[in-house]
Structures are given as C-alpha cells and as structure tokens.
Image (tube, rainbow, N blue to C red):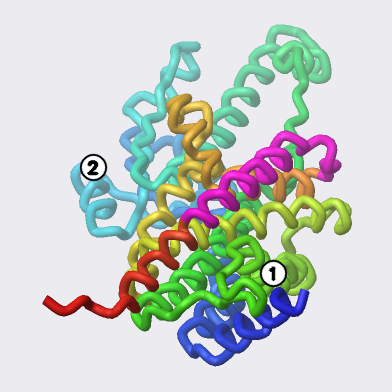
Amino acid sequence: MKYFWQILKEEYIAIFSDPGILLIVIAGLTVYTMVYPIPYVREVLKEVDVVAVDKDNTALSRKLLRWISATEEVNLCYRVANFAEAKDYVTAGKAYAIIVIPDEFEKKILTRRQAVVQLFADSAYFLIYRQVFTGVYKATATLSAGIEIRRMTAEGLTEPYAKMKWNILNTDVRALFNPAGGYATYVVPGVLMLILQQTLLIGIGILTGTRQEQFEPLPVSEKTKKPILSYIILARGFAYFSMYIFFPLFYISVVYRIYNLPQTGKLLELMLFLIPYVSSIILLGFSLCTLFVSREISIPALIFTSMPAVLLVGFAWPLETIPQWLRIFSLLFPSTSGSAGFVRINHMGASLYEVRWEWFTLWALNFLYFTTAWLSFRLYNYRVRKKQLPSLPN
C-alpha cells in the first residue's frame, strides 16, 4: 500500500503542476460544458423566415398566408410576384423557404377540385425544413378541414357530426422525455458524456507524452527494485478517477439547472453506472499512451476521433442506419454505452437493471483495457530501459 500511495501522490503532483493538463482536464472541461449548450438555449427553432408567391391573389389565398404566418414555426416576411424573385431572396439568405399558391386556387376549391400549395424549403438544414413544413402543413390542414366541414353542414349535417366525420380518429401526440421537442434536451446530455471522455483522454495523453519526451522511468518497488505495472495502473488511474467521477455531479447540479434540462433518474444508480464508464476511459487512455511520443501529438490525434465518436453514439445519426459491423466496433468506445446508459437513467428514469447490458459492456471494456494498458506500460518501460542502457564500445 505504501507503494500505491507513493505513486498516487506523484501522479497528483504531476497533474496539478502541469498547466496544460489543468487547462484541459479542469478548466477546459468546466468551461466547455458551460458554453456548449448556449447555442441551443431556445430549444425549438421558431419563426423561420419564408417568402410567398401568391399567383391567385384572392381572399382565400390571402387567408391561407395569414394562417401560415400565424403559426409559431413560420414568419412570412416577404411577398413577391414571381418565383424567380423569391428564389433570389433564398439565395441571398433573406429567407429559407418559398410558398407558392397557384392560379385558380380559390376557384378549384369552390368547384371541389384539388388545389396544390407548393413548398420549396432548404432541406440542407433539416431543422429549418422540418419547421417550415410543419407550419405550412398545420395551416393548410386547418383550412382544408374548415372547408370540408362547411360543405358537410351545407348538405344538412350538424356541425358536431360534421367535425366527427371529418376527424374520425382523434390523435393526441406527446413527445416522451422531451415535452418541448427541444434540440438541447435531445443532444446536450449525450455530448456532455463525450466531452468528459475526450478531455480525459487528452489529459492522459499530454502527461504521458511529456514522460515519453523525457524518458521518465516508471516507479519501482523498494523490495523488488522493479515496477509493478498493475499497481502503477491502479494508482495513476485512481488519481484521474477521483477527479472525474465528480464531473457528472457538476453536470446535474449546475449545467442542468442553468439550461433547464430534465433530470428524472436516481442519483445513486446514475453514479453506480458511471463508475465503469470513467474507469474504462482512463484505462483506454493508458492503453494509447505509447502512441503519444510527445505531448503535442495527443491533442490533434484525439480531437480527430471526436466526430466519429459522436456519430457512433447514435443520437447525431440513427443507429438503425449504421452498418452492423460498425455498430459492434463502436462498442470499443466507452462513450457509446456510456452516453446511452446515462441518458436512459437520467432522462428516461430507467433503473440500473434496465441498462444492465450497457453497464456490463463498460465492465467488459475495463477488463479489456486493463490488459492493453498493462501491455502498453510494459512497452513503455522497455523503451525507457533501452534508452538508458549504456552503449557498448566498438
């Protein structure tokens, strides 16, 4: 135990005496998690600017445009005479969609013919496309329902019966676990887990790279005069674990309250789930340590993996569309199981038993990466000893 505590003490000193590590591990993680959700504060995209081309210019067409503009999704900011002029507004970035009401729109409706309202939206930005489509659909569906109900009442049906006949199946759509349908509630929790992983890996990479630059030898036991790799891994790992295990509490108690993110899970079960998550990240960092021959290499190398890790987690891109072999490969990233389990416990109120497969996967990663970390430290020790051996005379 004396050997363990000595290594732990040296690791704390190394961490807190390196400004680069403190900038990434403590300041960077804290500031980044506070700043990242700012663009998503509004949660839902509203009042998307659109331009209208009213070729019919009748009372009914103008009524439809007023209803479209009255929805929370759409802001009708321009009305032009032709499609070419409307296209110029979209190209210039002044509007994001074009609504075209064709000629004889009112006449076709009054003569019981189908009238088509055209919508051209910027589908390169999916949120804009969805909001504009939703706003236009709500207004046109309401107008269509009103016309049909008036026709039925004109044929002698009572208004309540006409409404019931028009909408035989009444639906009540409610978004589970994200009542506002907000983007922040959807994406921020998973990204916070990924930020924890990447900053921790970078911090370990910086310190390991510094040691490799200086060919710093591993601590040795007083009895055997050799490094006991398992003790070194456990002691150094505990130094990082003791700091990072508390960051999820910072997420829940500070970040979640500032940005009004939902939190329904049990804190004890959440922390039990995060124990293997944090430890697997640390052991992964130790496994990769021999790759970082200098402190500068770790930052670009690990930042490069951030985007693939985001896509493989499954919230930025649907898991159903990812090839099966790639989904299996993604389990090697702690963030894949960690983010999924964290969101299900913290936001959906799942129990630890209900995320047992993610929890077992993280424990399996601990065993895997402890083995690879032991091999990595052994390789590092071999390199240091080889460097320190005196060269033989010719």
> Which stretch did the figure color magenta?
349-375
On whether residue 327 falls in the magenta region, the answer is no
Rendered location of residue 8, percent (x, y): 67, 78
- Residue found at x 77% / y 10%: 157
Q: Which amino acid is tagged 1?
A: Phe
CB within 8 Å, label 1 to label 2: no
Q: Nearer the viewer, residue 256 or 2?
A: 2
Q: Is residue 300 above or below residue 138?
A: below
Rendered location of residue 354, percent (x, y): 81, 35
Q: Is residue 98 visible?
A: no
Rendered location of residue 154, percent (x, y): 69, 13
- Residue found at x 23% / y 53%: 91
Secondary structure beneath label 1? helix
Could you tell which of marks 1 and 2 lies nearer the N-terminus?
A: 2
Q: Residue furthest front?
A: 394
Q: Nearer the viewer, residue 89 or 384?
A: 384
Disc 1/disc 2 C-alpha distance (Å): 68 Å
Classify residue 381 as left or right of residue 162: left
On whether residue 354 falls in the magenta region, the answer is yes
Classify residue 392 as left or right of residue 104: left
Report the predominant secondary structure element of the magenta stretch.
helix
Q: Give the residue pinned by disc 2.
A: 82
Classify residue 54 as left or right of residue 200: left
Q: Give the residue pinned by disc 1.
A: 238
Q: Splitting the image into 4 quarters, where does residue 176 fall?
A: top right
Q: Is residue 179 above or below residue 205?
A: above
